[in-house]
Image: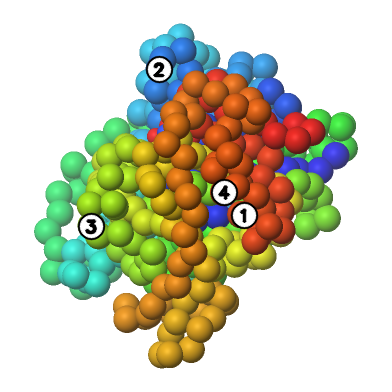
Amino acid sequence: MKVDVLLGLQWGDEGKGKVVDVLTPKYDVITRFQGGPNAGHTLEFNNIKHVLHNIPSGIFHPDKMNIIGNGVVLDPISFKQEIDKLEAMGMDLTRNLLISKKAHLILPTHRILDAASEACKGITKIGSTLKGIGPTYMDKTGRNGLRVGDILNNFDKKYSDLKKKHQQLLGMYDFEYNIAEFEKGLAEGIECIKKFTIIDSEHRINDYLKQGKSVLAEGAQGTLLDIDFGSYPFVTSSNTICAGACTGMGIAPNKIGEVYGIFKAYCTRVGSGPFPTELEDETGEALRKAGHEFGATTGRPRRCGWMDLVALKYSVMINGVTQLIMTKSDVLSTFETIKVATSYKINGVETEEFPYELPENMEVIYTELPGWNEDLTGMKSEDEFPEELNNYIAYLENELEIPITIISVGPDREQTILRGEN
Ligand code: GDP
Ligand code: IMO
Ligand code: MG
């Protein structure tokens, strides 16, 4: 068997959590392979909304196994908060959630370092989620980090040694902090992780594949936030792309099967950094309102703009996408015309290639398509789609040369339309 991967093609928040939950019945195992509690993955069913940060979005299907892979960074404090919430709903996750020994731990001092780094950058800040993601991955690549396996022996001493190093680093910033505040809940968080089965997940996942079990890897963030290929430096600190599933789970490239690329019918971004199709006007405000575009992790308003085909084609290429999923199609229902960016003009030169940098003064060239003034949220099949939506879908498929196999028309599990052979 192969591992199918579902990942974001834009700047995150494409609806990954919702669609992973919808696809979970087709799989035996769901894994996270990168990122950490910077992710906020929303699922809705039975009129209840759930937001997951550390835990894979297959968790609401009790007969499916969920794995936090080695490429993830895990914060014991935020993990316990999430577990507590789910346990309060009567769920026992110790049966169907496994954690990799090799996942790196986000420590309280990583969160302080994140805050200090952002504060000292001032207006050039990344707009990070302040979850300690950057400093934790820095310790990983700098070979100083602590891993989940480290909590199994002598953790306190290891933490206090690393904390000393972090405090020296923090001394270089003009930043005040109360360490006790940040450390609240750490001991309980560590004990909470110990309740779970901690495994060598690369062996387990490869064994599952040998046994014929199907695995879905759930990406976090999005391709344009990838540390190598995103709009650097306004990115996250991990490889959010398909290749990240290999290193973040310990599977070989030839074990990747389908690559589901998910995108919104328009674009959003939260945090700083370039956004060529951003609408800083009433149309952007209308998108934010109609799409309830506020961050699932930080509550910040998301910046909104039109679909960007230059960026989307780049993401499709980097990930080797085999199937596309379009979400939030319903949000575009009230617009007379829909705009799609088809090329950029930089220093007078037109290009369809996503460039090294996205200068502020670049020009964006758009195509306009007619909108559909029809509520999609109750639709159950593509046969009900208005002609203009079918045209939009056909236009995108033609440009991207990949079929759009799933259309999402609302936040609920049920508001999902499978096309073609699905
Ligand atoms: P993720 O990080 O990719 O899992 O996405 P988020 O959960 O951060 O953000 C997506 C938001 O859109 C959530 O509030 C979802 O409930 C919601 N959502 C997902 N799909 C749709 C859709 O097709 N239509 C609408 N209106 N909302 C959707
Ligand atoms: P999901 O999985 C949207 C953004 C932050 C910031 C930048 C770096 O829900 O799609 P970090 O805390 O990672 O160092 O922040 O990346 N960011 C996200 N934006 N969705 C996410 O995750 C994000 N995770 C990080 O806003 O601009
Ligand atoms: Mg999100």
Q: Are marks 2 and 3 in contact (CB under 8 Å)?
A: no
| Mark drawn on residue 9 | none
Q: Is residue 396 above or below residue 350?
A: above
CA gap, disc 2 and disc 3: 32 Å
State the residue position of label 4: 392
Amino acid at dot 4: Tyr
User: Which tag, 2 or 3, sits closer to the chain's start?
Assistant: 2
| Mark drawn on residue 281 | 3
Residue count near mark 1 (Cα–Cα under 10 Å), binned few <14, some 14–19, many ≥20: few
State the residue position of label 2: 48
Amino acid at dot 1: Tyr
- Would you say the beta carbon of the disc 4 residue lies within 8 angstroms of ligand 1? no
Residue count near mark 3 (Cα–Cα under 10 Å), binned few <14, some 14–19, many ≥20: few
Locate residue 58, reporting x and y percent: 59, 28
Q: Secondary structure at mark 1?
A: helix
Locate residue 375, reporting x and y percent: 44, 29
Q: Residue at x 66, y 45 (%)?
A: 404
Locate residue 4, reporting x and y percent: 73, 43
Q: Are marks 4 and 1 in contact (CB under 8 Å)?
A: yes
Q: Nearer the viewer, residue 278 or 92?
A: 278
CA gap, disc 4 and disc 1: 5 Å
Mark in the foreground, 2 or 4: 4
Mark in the foreground, 4 or 3: 4
Q: Secondary structure at mark 3?
A: loop
Q: Are marks 3 and 1 in contact (CB under 8 Å)?
A: no
Q: Quadrant of the C terminus?
A: top right
- Would you say the beta carbon of the disc 2 residue lies within 8 angstroms of ligand 1? no
Q: Residue at x 79, y 33 (%)?
A: 421
CA gap, disc 4 and disc 3: 23 Å
Amino acid at dot 2: Ile
State the residue position of label 1: 395
